[in-house]
Amino acid sequence: MALQTTLKALADPIRREILNLLRNGRMSAGEIADHFPVTAASISRHLSVLKEADLIRDDREGKYIYYDLNASVLEEIMLWITNLTGGDQDETPLE
């Protein structure tokens, strides 16, 4: 189920772009929203989906919530894809 949730989260172009933004460091929801022509509520929903898939983490500081990329989940997906394409056969696939 984890893989399905992660792939669903990655399927949306806005969510993929949010991950690209977070690659450069943590950002607040407002900073993220400034990069997209959609409502703040829409960005909030995208962030929720990414958080549910464990692709991002959040940290509250006062009235702001900052988001960080969780690269470990992406690394697991890369290992799984590598296994599919004939990479290292000793790696354990995702459950």
Image (spheres, rainbow, N blue to C red):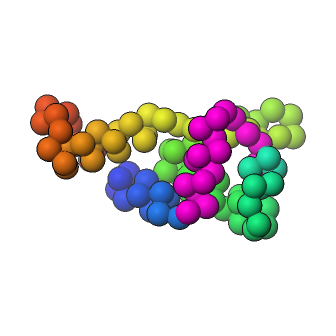
Is 80 left, or right, of 57 in this rendering? left
Image height of 42 relative to 90, above or below: below
Is 64 left, or right, of 86 in this rendering? right
Question: Residue, x 86% and y 34% (percent of image)?
Answer: 62
Give 63 or 39, whichever is nearer the viewer: 39
> Residue 59, percent across and down?
70, 35
Q: Answer whether residue 87 is visible to the viewer in this image.
A: yes
Picture mark count: 0
Question: Residue, x 50% and y 44% (percent of image)?
Answer: 54
Question: Residue, x 74% and y 61% (percent of image)?
Answer: 36
Residue 1 part of the magenta-drawn span: no
Is 5 left, or right, of 51 in this rendering? left
Is 82 left, or right, of 39 in this rendering? left
- Residue range (magenta): 13-29
Residue 14 part of the magenta-drawn span: yes
> Residue 90, percent across and down?
14, 31
Q: Residue lying farthest right?
A: 63
Where on the picture, by quarter, is residue 48? Answer: bottom right
Where on the picture, by quarter, is residue 26? Answer: top right
